[in-house]
Image (cartoon, rainbow, N blue to C red):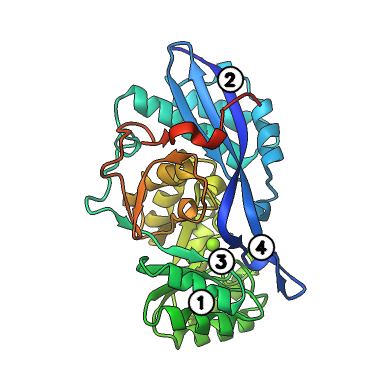
């Protein structure tokens, strides 16, 4: 067994095509969006010359920043990790104090990338999964903005057959009307990001959304700490399927979410990697929940890692890498919303490779 002899973490600012905002960015009735999103790339190498690549996309929603990611990475003794013993490597990672889930996620992905490449397999096959032969359809997200700008974004997204729209602003009605001017009749998934504070407010909003006729589901209507009785009340009355996201951290929340929601949204950076995301998807399915794989603002490293789990999902929302302009990597392809590994040059592991020059990114030390 060859231990990892080098672990590097490098901060990189992903540049957003449009200012990005969700309900938690609404302050005093105004939307405060971001134009850059810092992520951390992790590279593991061993003495045999094998390497693995991972990514952490820290979200302030979960109290994470690129600094918390680097802090966690600095306490890792790389020699306790190996591409040859994934379960011992994971047990070591889980034993470390002050866990940072995005950081753990990055290391888990890098370990799997290296192990799958050493085995000469794409990651999905290494995990015992197939990839859907026809690819898998993902939504394209329209972040919160003014009605005019949301209309323009929806027009720009004409090639994507499914939109996901962020709600939770004072102008929600005008925003939906604006998106509908650009995309009448298109299937829309909505995400309130916990914006509606009471069950009555949530039901009123959901009933209004149901009148649209082409809303597929509503993600996280109420805060994750809302009383379970309120969530049950809402689920009983909602004409649209409800999907838990902030309420579904990982597989341990499956029982609770099976009672409160119709489906759950799993994200690699919430669960702490591909391994735990796979467990979270399987736990949800076992309890009859529909499953969705979502993302943060991410490069092709995290998006490709998630895509390898597509066969365990009903819905994909893997668009983080098409919302940015400076992705230093290429991996899984998004062809008008269809997510496919067809024609990707790298055949094994995550199936990602650096773009020529990688936009000045050198994966140095932490
Ligand atoms: Mg969400």
Q: Does 304 sit left or right of 149 as displayed?
A: left
Question: Mark 4 to mark 1: distance in Å?
Answer: 17 Å
**Placement of 349 over or under 147, stated as above or below:** above
Which of disc 1 and disc 3 is earlier in sequence?
3
Residue at label 2? 78
Which of disc 3 and disc 2 is earlier in sequence?
2
Pointer 2: residues within 10 angstroms few (<14), some, or many (20+)? some
Can residue 214 be seen at all in this image of the molecule? Answer: yes
Farthest-out residue, right: 28
**Considering the numbered disc 1 on the image, is that residue within a helix, a strand or a loop?**
helix
Residue at label 3? 143
Which of disc 1 and disc 2 is earlier in sequence?
2
Q: Are marks 2 and 1 in contact (CB under 8 Å)?
A: no
Q: Residue at x 73, y 76 (%)?
A: 29
How many numbered circles are shown?
A: 4
Residue at label 1? 151
Pointer 3: residues within 10 angstroms few (<14), some, or many (20+)? many
Residue at label 4? 33
Give the image location of residue 170, x and y in percent. Answer: 66, 80
Q: Are marks 3 and 4 in contact (CB under 8 Å)?
A: yes
Question: Mark 3 to mark 1: distance in Å?
Answer: 11 Å
Which of pointers 2 and 1 indicates the residue nearer the eye? 1
**Considering the numbered disc 2 on the image, is that residue within a helix, a strand or a loop?**
helix
The label number, if any, that marks residue 199 in the structure image: none
């Amino acid at each position: 067994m060859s231990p990892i002899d080098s672990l590097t973490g490098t901060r990189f600012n992903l540049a957003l095509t449009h200012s990005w905002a969700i309900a938690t960015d609404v302050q005093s009735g105004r939307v405060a969006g971001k134009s850059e999103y810092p992520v951390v790339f992790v590279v593991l190498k061993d003495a045999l010359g094998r390497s693995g690549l991972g990514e952490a996309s820290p979200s302030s929603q979960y109290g994470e920043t690129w600094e918390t990611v680097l802090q966690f990475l600095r306490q890792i003794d790389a020699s306790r990790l190996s591409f040859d013993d994934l379960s011992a490597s994971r047990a070591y990672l889980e034993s470390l104090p002050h866990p940072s889930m995005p950081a753990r996620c990055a290391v888990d992905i890098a370990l799997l990338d290296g192990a799958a490449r050493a085995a000469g397999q794409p990651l999905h096959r290494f995990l015992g999964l197939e990839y859907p032969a026809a690819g898998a359809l993902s939504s394209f997200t329209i972040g919160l903005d003014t009605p005019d700008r949301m209309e323009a974004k929806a027009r720009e997204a004409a090639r994507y057959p499914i939109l996901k729209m962020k709600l939770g602003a004072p102008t929600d009605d005008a925003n939906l009307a604006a998106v509908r001017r650009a995309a009448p009749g298109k299937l829309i998934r909505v995400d309130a990001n916990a914006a509606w504070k009471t069950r009555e407010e949530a039901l009123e909003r959901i009933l209004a959304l149901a009148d649209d006729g082409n809303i597929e589901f509503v993600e996280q209507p109420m805060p994750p700490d809302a009383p379970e009785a309120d969530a049950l009340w809402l689920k009983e009355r909602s004409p649209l399927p409800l999907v838990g996201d902030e309420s579904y951290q990982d597989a341990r929340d499956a029982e609770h979410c099976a009672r409160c929601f119709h489906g759950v949204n799993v994200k690699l950076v919430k669960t702490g990697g591909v391994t735990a995301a796979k467990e979270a998807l399987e736990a949800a399915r076992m309890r009859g929940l529909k499953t969705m794989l979502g993302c943060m603002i991410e490069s092709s490293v995290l998006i490709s890692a998630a895509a390898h789990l597509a066969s365990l999902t009903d819905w994909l929302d893997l668009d983080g890498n098409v919302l940015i302009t400076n992705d230093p990597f290429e991996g899984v392809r998004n062809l008008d919303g269809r997510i496919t590994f067809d024609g990707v040059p790298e055949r094994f592991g995550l199936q990602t490779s650096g773009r020529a020059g990688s936009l000045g990114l050198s994966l140095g030390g932490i």
